[in-house]
Image (cartoon, rainbow, N blue to C red):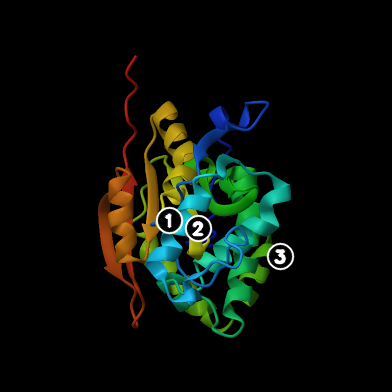
Amino acid sequence: MRHYIRPCSTSLPQLQRSPTPVLIRIRAEYGSGAHGNGAGSSPIVGSVGPECGEPERFDRAFDGIMDRVETVTRLADGRDLDRAAEVLGDAFADYPWTRWTVDRSEHQRRIIALQRIALEHFALPFGAISVSTVGGEIRSVAAWNDSAAVSAGKVDVAIQRQVAELEGCRHDASTAADRQVEKLRPEKRHLYLGTVGTTPTMQGRGLAAKTLAPLMQASDDDSIDVWLETSSESNVSFYRRLGFEVEGHLTIRGGGPDVWVMARRPVARRD
C-alpha cells in the first residue's frame, strides 16, 4: 500500500497509554507548508474573501479573525475519520504522487476514499492520527505509524481490492512506483509519516507544523527516527525547517514524479 496508505505497525505507547488525548493548545496562527494544495473554504471568514479584489485588506481581516479563534491539536479517534479524510482529499487534490497513482476520473472522490481507508485501517490501529481544529473544525491532519511490526501487520484482501479499484487505471503505475521507492526506505525501526495535509485556504500559517508536534514528541521520547516521502520540492524546504534531511531522491520511471525520502533524528532531552 502506497505513500498515502503504507501499512506499518504497533501503536505508539506514549501516546496510546494516556487516558486522555494529548492536547497542545495554541493560538490560531495556522496553515501548512505540507502536502498538497487545492480547493477549500473557510466558514469562519464568512463573506470576507479575496474575491473582493483587495487581497491585502482580506489578509489583514483574516488574520484579525484568526487571532481570536483558538486552535487545538489533539489525537484523533474514529469519530474524526470522515472529516479528516475530507481535509486530506482537499490537500492532495493536485499533488504529484496522487496525480500519478490515482485515476483522474472523479479524482478527488477517489483520494478521499483512499485516505479514509488509510486512516481507519492502518494509521488508527497501528500508529496515531493528530488533528488541529480551528474554531472546533478539523483543518489539518497528520497520520503515522511505527515500523516495528510491519512483518506482523496483515492487509485484508478486501482492503487491497478496494485500494486497487480506487486507484483505477493507475493501479499498475502505483504498484510499480511504490516498488521503486521501497528501495530507499530504511530497514531499521522508525516512525513513518504517511500523510500530513491542511485545508488549502488555511495553508501558510504554521498549522501543519503544529499538527506534527505530537509525532515529533513521540520520536524524541522514544529516541527513534521519523521517515517520510514527499513528491513536492516545496515540501522539502518545509520539512528541513522541522529538522528533516534528504536521505534519497529519485524520479519515478515512465514520466512519474520526483520523490524525496527524508528523515529526522530524535532530539535528546535536556534535563
Query: Is the residue under label 1 in contact with that under label 2 (CB below 8 Å)?
Result: yes
Judged from the image, the secondary structure of the residue bearing numbered disc 1 is loop
Q: What's the amino acid at mark 1?
A: Ser
Whichever of labels 2 and 1 marks the residue nearer the N terminus, that label is 1
Q: Please indicate whether residue 51 sits to the left or right of residue 253 in the image.
A: right
Decide which of 265, 234 is in the foreground and name it: 234
- Any part of residue 35 in sight: no
Whichever of labels 3 and 2 marks the residue nearer the N terminus, that label is 3
Residues packed near mark 3 inside 10 Å, few (<14), some (14 to 19) or many (20 plus): few
Q: Closer to the camera: disc 1 or disc 3?
A: 1
Residue under pointer 1: 32
- Toward which corner of the image does residue 169 lie, by quadrant? bottom right
Q: Which residue is drawn at the image coordinates 51% and 61% (left, top)?
A: 4
Residue 209: x and y, percent?
42, 46
Quick check: 181 above or below 262?
A: below
Q: How many marks?
A: 3
Quick check: 145 above or below 3?
A: above
Quick check: 38 above or below 77?
A: below
Q: Which residue is drawn at the image coordinates 68% and 54% (left, top)?
A: 81
Residue farthest to the right?
79
Residue under pointer 2: 198
Residues packed near mark 2 inside 10 Å, few (<14), some (14 to 19) or many (20 plus): many
Q: What's the amino acid at mark 3?
A: Ala
Whichever of labels 1 and 3 marks the residue nearer the N terminus, that label is 1
Residue farthest to the top?
271
C-alpha distance separating marks 1 and 3: 34 Å
Residue under pointer 3: 158
Judged from the image, the secondary structure of the residue bearing numbered disc 3 is helix
Residue 129: x and y, percent?
58, 46
Q: What's the amino acid at mark 2?
A: Thr
C-alpha distance separating marks 2 and 1: 6 Å
